[in-house]
Image: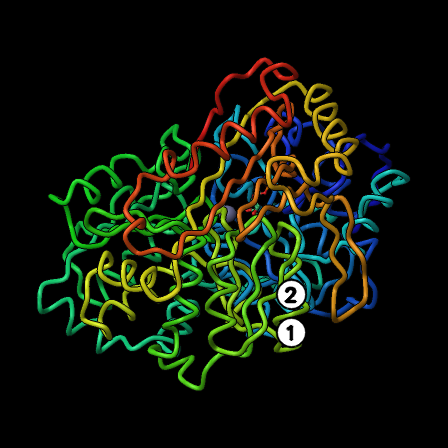
Amino acid sequence: MIETIATKPFDGQRPGTSGLRKKVTVFQQPHYAENFIQSIFNSLESFVGKTLVIGGDGRFYNKEVVQIALRMAAANGFGKVIVGQNGLLSTPAASHLIRKNQAFGGIILSASHNPGGPDGDFGIKYNASNGGPAPEKLTEAMFAHTQTIASYKTLRHADVNLDKIGHHTLGSMQVEVVDPVTDYAALMQTLFDFDLIRARIKSGLTMKFDGMSAITGPYGKHILEDTLGFAQGTVINGTPLPDFGGHHPDPNLVHAKELCDSVLSGNGPDFGAASDGDGDRNLIVGKGIYVTPSDSLAIIAANMHLAPGYKAGIAGIARSMPTSGAADRVAAKMGLKCYETPTGWKFFGNLLDANKATVCGEESFGTGSNHVREKDGLWAVLMWLNILAARKQSVADIVHAHWAEYGRNYYTRHDYEEVDLAAATNLMNGLRNQLPSLVGQHSIEKADDFAYDDPIDGSRTTGQGIRLLMANGARVIYRLSGTGTAGATLRVYIEKYESDPSKHNQETQSALANLITLSRSVAQIEKLTGRAQPTVIT
Ligand code: G1P
Ligand code: ZN
């Protein structure tokens, strides 16, 4: 029986960089998740009888919201929902299922790399029929609906059993429960040379993959151990847990420390990788070398023709504005365009759909291609394995050869987390006001607030980060995070280009020391936020 439940708007249901993210306790308020889901449906047109994909990263509260979303999809008139077994789907696997089944769209339950558990974070986002995150026009429409919502539709019905693969009905809607891994793994086999990778593993290549107790454990075990033949135990922290074992499922040098320490020391395996809560991020390390996500994008772009799915070459490259300029140099050499977009994967969708770009990346451990419309952690890992197998070189050799050919973009990101919101806003406003007077000082050639004109749909997005651009590609960029759930997070991105190979072996923080000092003084970070040091350096 369809029920119409009266409700009142909640403040603050505006989707951020990647959907609506709040504390679990916020989502647990009566009607909170329902209001947002109904506002998603209210922003969509002509979906009656169509298919919706639903799944999440398995974090605390995933189970409950999957059932809420199923009942509401049925009450709102969807014809069918495809849902991952136990309500699980990695973000890239969800994107693939939407595309493969020509679904109308999908609801992904995830707060990505944010901590989970009863006191952690939860999130809901909507992906459109191309498999990609809803564009801003749509997220703004959702937000508008959240401010005026007066009722939502649901079904009075028991929970659907999601334990087993199979078919159910929910009112007049069909529900198909699918294995979360199968279709995704099949897609990977069409893109990469699994035989070549297998041969390299047989000849001794070793790796560790850290699933961070999040969604990618089962994907990693199936693909890396069972299909490619890496030793059992190659995947560590491979069982998804609702609280991610109490850790941040964020694959970086801080949160994947154990893996990084063992590979970087040179005593561990040849290759190390990790993915995040919902499986869209990746970390790449080799014996003795950490590959920055910006370098990884550039190296992948330069080598991806070695993978069968890309042997015809690539149409172009896209990177988010704060991502280093390393990929631009690869694009220039290949005679291709490198698009510079605002932060957030949603800005790549149009470029991928229009075949202007084949590969995209963000400095925040995100890399992906036109195979789906999300960044894809395991895709990046398999791409690296394919490149390692084809070039028969180590990660370090490949990175050093890349720098020798293109030069090195020294790069770091300094995060000041949970800063007072008013102080952070004040700091950004202060920088904005200083912009005209900064040009000419400290070798700053241009200073602006980044705006993006989408070349496909002509939309303009403003206020995407303060940029201080200096001679020879050096940059300092400031922006506030759009994914945090407590206070504000100030991100400062610092970069410098070095063409001389004799200067390619410096420690990153020392190579960037002058710019780091400048980044703090120009923005008066300590004075305005009380923070002398960042909380996280990547
Ligand atoms: C962060 C990253 C951004 C990424 C997003 C979702 O957003 O910086 O590149 O797309 O997470 O994974 P932010 O918190 O900076 O808004
Ligand atoms: Zn993620």
Q: Is residue 1 visible?
A: no
Tell me: 452 left or right of 55: right
Q: Is residue 264 above or below residue 248?
A: below
Q: Is mark 1 within 8 Å of ligand 1?
A: no
Farthest-out residue, bottom: 312
**In terms of image quadrants, where is residue 313?**
bottom left
Marks 2/1 in contact by CB < 8 Å: the verdict is: yes
Q: Is mark 2 within 8 Å of ligand 1?
A: no
Image x and y of residue 385, in percent = 27, 65
Image x and y of residue 319, in percent = 56, 59
Query: Looking at the image, which residue is at 53% across and 47% down?
Result: 474
Q: Is residue 18 visible?
A: yes
**In terms of image quadrants, where is residue 519?**
top right
Q: Which mark is residue 349?
A: 2
What residue does disc 1 label?
353
Looking at the picture, tell me which residue is in the foreground, 180 or 177: 180
Query: Looking at the image, which residue is at 58% across and 16% down?
Result: 526
Looking at the picture, tell me which residue is in the foreground, 152 or 90: 90
Q: CA distance from mark 2 to mark 1?
A: 6 Å
Q: Quadrant of the C terminus?
A: top left
Identify which amino acid the numbered label 1 is placed on: Asp
Image x and y of residue 471, in percent = 57, 49
Check disc 2 and report its element: helix, strand or loop. helix
